[in-house]
Image: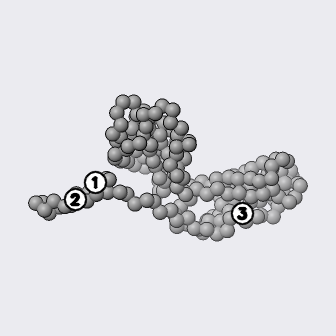
Amino acid sequence: MSITSYSQERVGPITIVTVVSDLTGLVYYHWYLDGSYVATTTAPTYTFSLEVGDQVRIEAIDTNDPEFDPIAGAPPVYGARKSLWWTRSGSPDAVHYRVVQVDQFLTQTIIAEVDALDEQWSFSVQTPRLIDGTLYEWWVYPYDKAGNQGTRVEIEPLAAVLRVPDAPRFTATYNGGTQRVAFAAA
């Protein structure tokens, strides 16, 4: 895989990413958002629709191999989301669960409704994208058939999300004649 440059243009919620590969022939580009596979193209440009202010990591892998598995070959997941796990309610009356995300301003957002299946003992959901530097906690409420809410369970204590991306790799060259420094992607 040999992407030599990466550029992006953003206009409101639209982000257009373009990469340059030094591969020749038919090249397959596999696109990822926060480490999750999005699409495969043969064009070196892909358009993402992102909320204004959304912090994401967009990556592309290029290959000539038409059999490349974009899921197995995905880059490491960048922690912009969190997987939440909980076990079945002790109450036999629970028929579904409501997962609530609470931020540092005490804003509560329902992020999932999950049915309680008789044979299932553990459950999981993935949060929406999280904002760096914001404190979050997550609660699960069991509900019975009549829609009565049970006692909430805190499934994740108060936590801050702080993602630190890898620093870009670059080279710097000083030109004594012009007394300038030129930077280039490494």
Residue at image position (26%, 57%) is 183
**Marks 3 and 2 close (CB-CB < 8 Å):** no
Pointer 3 local density, CA inside 10 Å: few below 14, some 14–19, many at least 20: some
Pointer 2 local density, CA inside 10 Å: few below 14, some 14–19, many at least 20: few
Closer to the eye: label 3 or 1: 1
Q: Is residue 67 left or right of residue 19?
A: right
Along the line of sight, the residue nearer the viewer: 100 or 33: 33
Residue at image position (35%, 40%) is 21
Residue at disc 3, secondary structure: strand
* Mark sitting earlier along the chain (3/1): 3
How far apart marks 2 and 1 lie (CA) works out to 8 Å
Q: How is the image coloured?
A: one colour
The residue indicated by pointer 3 is 155
**Marks 2 and 1 close (CB-CB < 8 Å):** yes
The residue indicated by pointer 2 is 173
Give the numbered dot on residue 184.
1
Image quadrant containing the N terminus: top left
Q: Is residue 156 left or right of residue 38?
A: right
Q: Amino acid at mark 2?
A: Thr
- Where residue 61 appears, x then y in whole percent? 44, 43
How far apart marks 3 and 1 lie (CA) works out to 46 Å
Pointer 1 local density, CA inside 10 Å: few below 14, some 14–19, many at least 20: few
How far apart marks 3 and 2 lie (CA) works out to 51 Å
Q: Amino acid at mark 1?
A: Ala
- Residue 9 in sight: no
The correct choice, above or below, for 172 with respect to 158 in the image is above
